[in-house]
Amino acid sequence: MSNAVVVNEVLKKFGKPTDQTWRRLLPYKPNTNGSKSQDNGRKPIVLAVNRVSFDMLEGEIFGVLGPNGGGKSTLIRLISTLLLPDAGTITVFDRDVVRQPRQVQWMINRVSVEASFFKKLSPMENLLYGARLYGMAGGDIRSKVIEILTRLGLDKRAILNPMEEMSRGMQQKVAVARALLSRPRLLLLDEPTTGLDPRSKREVQAVVRELREEHGVTILLTTHDMTEAETLCDRIAIMDQGSIVAMNTPEKLCTMVPSPNGHKPTLEDVFLELTGKSLVADEEKEVA
Ligand SMILES: Nc1ncnc2c1ncn2[C@@H]1O[C@H](COP(=O)(O)OP(=O)(O)OP(=O)(O)O)[C@@H](O)[C@H]1O
Ligand SMILES: [Mg+2]
């Protein structure tokens, strides 16, 4: 198997709002209580992705876990060419995301939790629009749309009604279907099952598995569901405050921490043990 994605020493910084920005936006400055967002004469920054390196093999399902704000979505947006790295390189099937963004865009698709649609249009119309953007045409697109959406558990009525009449979970399924339609070689799934009920979750997970097994699609997945990560992913990277703190198969990760109460550690134990440490230390310093 060859490398599908190579992420090398990637760094992405964001500027935090300064006192000047707050003054422009609000008549008062919110109480930032000793947090790092205070000015101190220079623009404070967040290191959203901090010198991250890893490779993904073709056909691999690679999970990225981490606390809120850990840098997972930023990493996905960098790989999908939506953001430019401040340092480091990323290649997708040997194409550089900065120098060859168009070539990368043809090979990938992304599902994010905040997927946007034309809300007055139906899933069918939204997906046909998406297909057009990818240069897909022909009479079989409609039947393909119905096939994918039905596979994900949406009925005919929902497929033809306006998106705004659908629940968030149903809309999430349409987002997954839209990403599958273009048959990407690399699929970037940012919390694809967040907000889905247990049955819907399983339907999406089954489709993810099938994509890899039957079509060899390479998949990068973020999730806050530890069971999902454990059952779907070949390897998992745990990200905290922009850095990868551990990376291995789910089984090997579970051997990395001491057993709590004499039981074999779960992925959740590993997550809790390896993340949030420096935040706790920072808070303790502030209290002291
Ligand atoms: N556009 C932006 N402008 C400024 N800061 C940002 C921006 N996007 C992300 N950040 C910051 O970068 C850090 C990483 O955010 P990111 O969304 O990548 O985290 P995440 O791991 O996806 O979190 P979650 O689990 O909540 O989705 C956070 O501190 C966040 O506030
Ligand atoms: Mg995120």
Image (cartoon, rainbow, N blue to C red):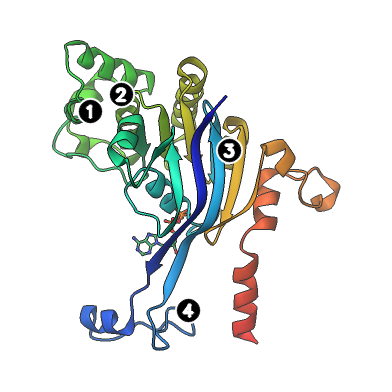
Query: What residue do we see at 42% from left, 46% from top?
Result: 76
Nearer-N-terminus badge (1/3): 1
Identify the residue position indicated by label 3 in the image.
229
**Residue marked by disc 2:** 181
Residue 32 screen position, x and y as percent = 42, 82
Q: Is residue 204 above or below residue 22?
A: above
What is the distance, in whole Å, between disc 2 and disc 1 at their CAs? 9 Å
Q: Position of residue 30 (x, y in %)?
A: 35, 82
* Percent coordinates x, y for residue 94 in the rendering: 44, 34
Q: Respond yes or no on whether mark 3 lies under 8 Å from ligand 1.
A: no
Pointer 1 residue: 134
Asked whether disc 2 touches disc 1, contact meaning CB atoms under 8 Å apart, the reply is yes
Distance from disc 3 to disc 4, alpha carbons, whole Å, reads 32 Å
State whether residue 136 is above or below residue 271: above
Q: Which residue is mark 4?
A: 36
Residue toward you, 54 or 30:
54
Residue type, mark 3 in image = Ala
Tell which circle, 2 or 4, labels the residue nearer the N-terminal end.
4
Q: Nearer the viewer, mark 2 or mark 3?
A: 2
Q: Give the secondary structure at mark 1.
A: loop
Q: From the image, state whether disc 3 or disc 4 is nearer to you.
A: 4
| Circle nearer the viewer, 4 or 1 | 1
Q: Earlier in the sequence, mark 2 or mark 1?
A: 1
Residue at left offset 25%, top offset 43%? 116
Mark 2 or 3 closer to N-term?
2
Q: Which one is earlier in the sequence, the residue at label 4 or at label 1? A: 4
The residue nearer to you, when weighing 144 against 260, is: 144
Toward the right, the furthest residue is 262
Gap between marks 2 and 3 measured at Cα: 24 Å
Which of label 2 and label 1 is nearer to you?
1
